[in-house]
Amino acid sequence: GIQVEQSPPDLILQEGANSTLRCNFSDSVNNLQWFHQNPWGQLINLFYIPSGTKQNGRLSATTVATERYSLLYISSSQTTDSGVYFCAVTAGGSYIPTFGRGTSLIVHP
Amino acid sequence: SQTIHQWPATLVQPVGSPLSLECTVEGTSNPNLYWYRQAAGRGLQLLFYSVGIGQISSEVPQNLSASRPQDRQFILSSKKLLLSDSGFYLCAWSRGTSGSSEQYFGPGTRLTVT
């Protein structure tokens, strides 16, 4: 099956810093999502982005499908950005997403 | 708009007791439904998924079972809980008939087996 790798596994920032999270996948995909799991466990949809670039406030994402990677940019980080960021992809018409192991982000005040 | 509910939010159960976790989706019809477990650490493990009433696929053989008695209801059960069943259980849905649709998660149930 398709492999999904996220990097870095852990990231510690000071409030106000910028960061880039990466998701590499091993095959063509027809769906790619970024999620933020907050400290209470809720998985929040950030972007549905099988290709192209999207922006939502301080967050933006870019997926280069031909090169099999996606990037999540967080600018001017805040303590509320802390949590785990997951990338999930679906390939070949499957209903089953494959999740990466996540990037754990801690933002210090 | 669509919403997904899970209950209970937290549960503490003794080893050997039964389990029933419920998930319901509102505002859509014929959704794909999923049960995930997240143990200590980060990984999400898919347990079951369903593309329609009575249609359940199991991804991991284990002490759990799932049922879909109604279009927008998904139930996770166990007859006898094990310590290893502890974890955070998440229900999710996506629009049916498409493998490329967005997935949405419920708030989760935190299960501790003592």
Image: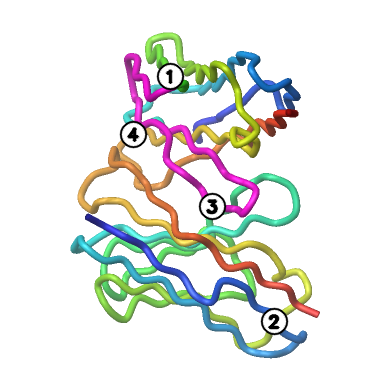
Which residue type does callout 4 highlight? Gly
Element class at badge 2: loop
Tag nearer the camera, 4 or 3: 3
Q: Position of residue A34 (x, y in %)?
A: 46, 32
Closest to the observer: A7 or A92?
A7
Which residue type does callout 2 highlight? Leu
Q: Position of residue B10 (x, y in %)?
A: 62, 73
Chain ID of residue with mark 1:
A
Chain ID of residue with mark 2:
B
Element class at badge 3: loop
Range drawn in magenta: A33-57
Residue A92 is marked as: 4
- At 73% from the left and 20% from the top, the residue drawn is A14
Tag nearer the camera, 4 or 1: 1
Q: The C terminus of chain A is located in which quarter?
A: top right
Q: Position of residue A22 (x, y in %)?
A: 57, 19
Does A34 appear in magenta? yes
Q: Residues at badges 4 and 1 in contact (C-beta under 8 Å)?
A: no
Element class at badge 4: loop
Q: What is the distance, in whole Å, between disc 2 and disc 1 at their CAs?
A: 42 Å
Within 10 Å of disc 3 (Cα), the crowding (few <14, some 14-19, many 20+) is some
**Image quarter for residue B18?**
bottom right
**Residue designated by label 1:** A60
Chain ID of residue with mark 4:
A
Q: What is the distance, in whole Å, between disc 4 and disc 1 at their CAs?
A: 26 Å
Q: Is residue A76 left or right of residue A10?
A: left
Same subunit under labels 1 and 3? yes
**Mark 1 or mark 3, earlier in chain:** 3
Element class at badge 1: strand
